[in-house]
Image (cartoon, coloured by chain):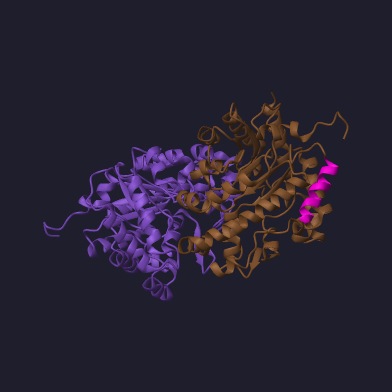
Chain colours: A brown, B purple
Amino acid sequence: MTAATPAPTTSNFLRACRGEPVTHTPVWLMRQAGRFQAEYRAIREKVGFLELCKTPELAAEVTVFAVRQLGVDAGIIFADILLVLEPMGLRVTFEKGDGPVIHDPIAGAGDVDRLTGEIEPASLGYVGEAIRAFKRELPTVPLIGFAGAPFTLASYAIEGGGSKQYIATKRLMYEDPGAFSALMERLSTAITRFLTMQIEAGADAVQLFDSWAGALSPSDYRRHVAPHMKRIVSTLPDGVPVITFGTGTGGFLEELAASGADVVGVDWRLDMADAARRLPGVTLQGNLDPVTLFGPVDAMRREVEAILSAARGHRGHVFNLGHGILPGTPVDHVRALVELVHELSAR
Amino acid sequence: MTAATPAPTTSNFLRACRGEPVTHTPVWLMRQAGRFQAEYRAIREKVGFLELCKTPELAAEVTVFAVRQLGVDAGIIFADILLVLEPMGLRVTFEKGDGPVIHDPIAGAGDVDRLTGEIEPASLGYVGEAIRAFKRELPTVPLIGFAGAPFTLASYAIEGGGSKQYIATKRLMYEDPGAFSALMERLSTAITRFLTMQIEAGADAVQLFDSWAGALSPSDYRRHVAPHMKRIVSTLPDGVPVITFGTGTGGFLEELAASGADVVGVDWRLDMADAARRLPGVTLQGNLDPVTLFGPVDAMRREVEAILSAARGHRGHVFNLGHGILPGTPVDHVRALVELVHELSAR
């Protein structure tokens, strides 16, 4: 690196995470490397999803490609939230079209003992390798590492896959809160080790995806989830921004901020202005409805303006969607979105 | 009816809807007649879902049975939100296990003209007959009529069935707001006629189910849905409480109240205390997580106490779940819930 190369720490993305002034609102998009891209689909015709995650050169390649194609202000390493379950002791497979399957799911206290939280980070070393490969290719672009949050991982481990109602998960939570908490603790330990390894490999920020936290009532989240989130955030290395995100969490957004995270992601079901009023102390990330990208650019522009304007003057804003990019989204609309954010927010 | 028979208008349910004092918090439960009951499943082994809806004696029977079995304070007539689409000009079938199918869905402006809002209420006369049969059997029990709200019906009419992302619905909304609004207007007219007929047949209150409104951003709800909701509520006969409800609407609950509804249903993703603070002028309905019914009664009791306590002193509270009763819910836990609400709220 020459002296002229801007280090990621001065990037708009990291400055926004820290609540510092920016020259434009930084933008990245959840699932910015994915099925909406012909180039990604071409790779996936040759390798399976898990194989892609576990082949560092390929994982780095799709991560780098998304940054170059879309012009976003940060990359997010290509991986999956369920990878950490393997070294913990669960077998995970991805069936075509059916989503993930977790074999021998957790049914009660006895099963929790089967799992270890004290994972060997080297068992997930391929993610670290991918991070290093990205950094070699794009040393000035901030890179986000990530992990699933403990509740979302617990729900997969208990339900054995995706779920609509989370009945088994909540039953364990209500019937045996001790066993549920023990499971959450082991998951939290493993997640912390995984994220720390990603940071050591070069991740400039980390995001905790609590994809299914929105299935919980605020009181259940406070009781059964919030303490574990706090523990993870406080145990991670200092100086690296932590982002928390879950859809449908508008009813207890304050709890996400109380975890100590620097940035809270907001889904599209909440006005950015409401989020800004409720969370003055954190940077906000979000929150365009991903389906807006299927409509005309004019309608999208109006929504982007409204979101930028609601976040103006706030502690910090990282533009994003309120959920991941959907398959079938027109690539040119995604690029138009990134340009719009840069253009409309230029200081 | 003898003079000693209390008319429904003095019932705790209707008093709570109007914000008047009650002797205990009234409770009814969404989908209180349904697959969690062995008696309902036995009837459904003999008749299909649509046939059950369209046979007034049977529809009244399952409605009455739920009130008697559970001890709830109100009945809700057994029917389906999609019934109104038939006289409007769409063909609806229910495939076993696959949910509803709407044949020849709406793809654009031209298709909207195929639909009529000016439906003949007699075409849905079987719902009125079922209401009258319920009233003969249980004249002192308040009965709720209902309809799907226009956005939810529009999404079915456009997607051709259930949906996860509502891409086709939102595309029409963004690309051709005129056609979308014309569709919403026709739906609103038909819904108003349908509900008015139910009120004339004896319904004491009506609920608008906006099951999928939670897929929308607050700004899209305000722009594309709220005006139609206002029009429906203002056109309905005076003196009959109107309840609006949708899951995932915590980000724009104020808009549901702004429709002019007397009662706003709250899902379990929001603290009842927050809802009460935000909507001082309306009665609140809700909001126990339906999965709580799968857990131990002790854990349920704690949540019921918290909800009752948060709503105490509010303009009015009708206890309910935050969504419908799920198949597999233990019937004895549902009865325990109703007893708990009555016991813990007795003045």
Q: Nearer the viewer, residue B30 or B173?
A: B30
Quadrant of residue A190 in the image? bottom right
Query: Which image quadrant for residue A118?
Result: bottom right
The C terminus of chain A sits in image quarter: top right
> Is-magenta flag for residue B144?
no
Name of the residue lying farthest toward the top: A347
Q: Position of residue B27 (x, y in %)?
A: 31, 55
x then y, percent, for residue A95: 69, 65
B322 w.r.t. A339: above or below: below
Q: Is residue A201 visible?
A: yes
Classify the position of the N terminus of chain A by image quarter: top right
Tell me which residue sits at (80%, 41%) in the image: A68
Is B315 in front, or is A231? A231
Q: Is residue A271 above or below residue A78?
A: above
Total marks shown come to: 0
Q: Nearer the viewer, residue B167 or A196?
A: A196
- The residue that appears at 81% across and 55% down in the rendered structure is A42
Q: Is residue A127 left or right of residue B250?
A: right
Residue A12 percent coordinates (x, y):
72, 31
Which of these two is toward me, B210 or B159?
A: B210
Magenta stretch, main secondary structure, is: helix
Answer with the quarter of the image where residue A266 lies. top right
- Magenta part of the chain: A125-138
Q: Where residue A93 sits: x, y (%)?
A: 70, 65
Residue B196 in view (yes/no): no
